[in-house]
Amino acid sequence: MTDRGRQAVKRRRVFLISSALIIGIILGTISFGVSRLFTPKSDNNEKKETKSSSVSKTVKKIKKDESKSEETSSKQVTTPKTNGNKLNEKYSNLMLVNAKNPLPDNYDSEIRKDLVEIEPELRNNNYVTKIHKSVYPYITAMVRAAQADGVDLKVWSPFRSYADQKALFDKQVERYGGDEDKAATIVARPGTSEHNSGICADFNMADDAFEQTEMFKWLCEHAEEYGFILRYPKDKQDKTGVIYESWHWRFVGIEAAKKINKSGLCLEEYLKKNNIKQEVSVDNF
């Protein structure tokens, strides 16, 4: 091969190599550009999908929370309430305690485990301070409501033991020259007093002057909302066997109190008229 032929072959190889390099660079550039062009769009789609999923979950949670809130509101509306306090309006205790229906001998000892202390700010007596646990929510709610209304209502004498009742009874017997029957119209014999049951209370003072107080007026207007009735009304001594006591209020239950007050009857009359008999027992609670 001549020198001219060899040079021609060499130029052809250089051309081919150069062309291959150029083509490789061009293809690499195109590939990179295509990659840059399409990859970000894919990332954006993923972000959008993630965001969309997050929003969907948030909306579902909000709807779920709203549903729970509506359900809670519905439950609160149907829950028996009295002045903001959740009290069972249907609970009642119509146990009749009087001279003809005395408490059992073991009641005094059996009831002790079910007594609870009334807070000092709700009472004005440090001698007798307890009430039956079933009545506690009602009496404390009532006193707090009265105090919130600016009325200085306070528990004076709730539960009394048989021993305490005997001491009070004996004092009245002495006062009336040994006449126990007369004394019993003012202070019941041990075991026949509602105070021994733990489901009643005297308020502020055991005095006729209580009838003229704001406390008595408030009780007449609101006590039934908490399940209490005036236990020994005027002109009912022949039925109750006890003199009129404006300070003595008995728990019977909210629905029962409203029915009894509406009837105008004392507890003895109401139970008899409606043929209601409830055994005098610790098991009534």
Image (spheres, rainbow, N blue to C red):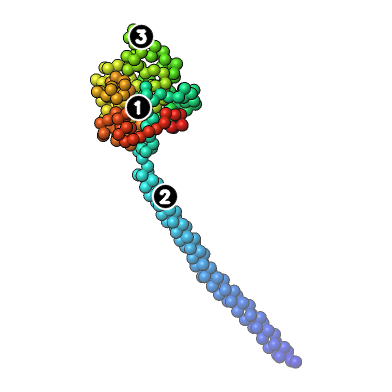
* Residue 134 percent across, percent down from the top left: 42, 31
Q: How far separated are the C-alphas under marks 2 and 1?
A: 40 Å
The disc, 1 or 3, on the residue closer to the chain's N-terminal end is: 3
Q: Residue furthest bottom?
A: 1
Q: Is residue 122 visible?
A: no
Q: Which residue is mark 2?
A: 68
How many residues crowd around disc 1 within 10 Å: few (fewer than 14), some, or many (20 or more)?
A: many
- Disc 3 residue type (three-letter): Gly
- Above or below residue 110? Residue 25 is below
Q: What residue is at 31 percent from the left and 20 percent from the top?
A: 242
* Quadrant containing the N terminus in the rendered view: bottom right
Percent x, y for residue 188? 37, 18
- What type is the residue that disc 2 sits on? Lys
Disc 1 to disc 3, how far (Cα)? 29 Å
Pointer 2 local density, CA inside 10 Å: few below 14, some 14–19, many at least 20: few
- Residue 115 visible in the current orientation: yes
Camera-side mark, 3 or 2 = 3
Asked where in the image residue 121 lies, by quadrant, the reply is: top left
For residue 228, above or below residue 1:
above
User: On the image, numbered disc 1 is attached to which residue?
Assistant: 250
In the picture as drawn, the residue positioned furthest to the right comes out as 1
Residue underneath mark 3: 178
Residue 20 x/y as whole percent: 63, 80
Residue in front for this viewpoint, 23 or 40: 40
- Which mark is first along the chain, 2 or 3? 2
Question: Who's the residue at 37% across and 28% down the image?
Answer: 96
